[in-house]
Amino acid sequence: MASLLTLVIIITVGSPKTVLAADNSKTPPITSYEYIARPGDSLSLLTRKSLQLYAKAKNTQLSSAAAMYCENNVATKLGNRRLEINEQVSIPFDLLQQYIVNSRSLDAVQLDAWNTYAQNANFNLSDLHPINESAAQSVAQPNASSTSTQSSSQKQPDTKAKTNESKTEKPAIKFSWPHWFATLSITVIVAYAFKKFEPDHN
């Protein structure tokens, strides 16, 4: 009985352990500028600031008239509602991009009409910042791949393949020398036990 208990203890302590990589939860992708509304903030004002940041990140020139066109349409899409103090507000990148592109189709008459509104707007918003400004600007910047050379684009599939291989890599099983020693000890003890308690047929 004591021998069996010893075997159980050795097996429990000496069994190899599988080391699994930590399953870190992925951070949701950044797809918008996030604000906490202050007293006096409006959806139009937050959209105006977002347009300034987004155009800067994209290296896009946006006239005051075009900015007013974009601001009005984005704010309307988001409901153009009155904001509550401390309300969290999201200004999506895709809406900003959509109306910046659309603004390039405005003719001279339309731009002149929007410029009338722009003359009364305050574009000095240096005191207004989204809570995720740094991260959002980094994400909103043009992809490096869009300006890469043809040779670098040809290497891209290889990079993706290596990435896929790393994702499918199985958890490694690591053994330290005590585990091997314990396993060897188990084998010797079991063999000795069978030989010792083998029935005598003579």
Image (spheres, grey):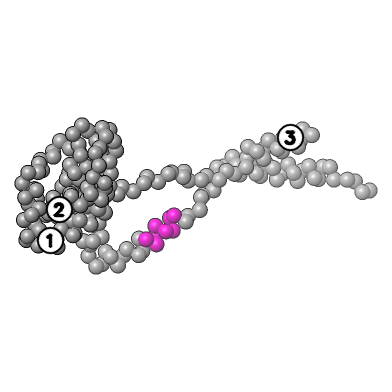
Query: Measured from the top left, where is residue 102 in percent x and y?
Result: 18, 60
Q: Earlier in the sequence, mark 3 or mark 1?
A: 3
Secondary structure under the numbered disc 3 in the rendered image:
helix
Magenta residue span? 160-167
Going by the image, does 135 lie left or right of 23? Answer: left
Quarter of the image for residue 40 reads top left
Q: Residue at x 47, y 55 (%)?
A: 169
| Type of amino acid at the residue the image marks with label 2 | Tyr
| Type of amino acid at the residue the image marks with label 3 | Leu
Quadrant of the drawing holding the N terminus: top right
Q: Is residue 103 above or below residue 130?
A: below
Query: Measured from the top left, where is residue 186 in percent x and y?
Result: 69, 42
Mark 3 closeness class: few <14, some 14–19, many ≥20 residues within 10 Å: few
The CA distance from mark 3 to mark 1 is 85 Å
Q: Are marks 2 and 1 in contact (CB under 8 Å)?
A: yes
Q: Earlier in the sequence, mark 3 or mark 2?
A: 3
- The residue wearing badge 1 is 106
Magenta segment includes 161: yes
Quarter of the image for residue 128 reads top left
Going by the image, does 171 lie left or right of 193? Answer: left
Q: Earlier in the sequence, mark 2 or mark 1?
A: 2
- The residue wearing badge 2 is 69
The CA distance from mark 2 to mark 1 is 9 Å
- The residue wearing badge 3 is 5
Foreground: disc 3 or disc 2: 2
Q: Is residue 139 above or below residue 13?
A: below
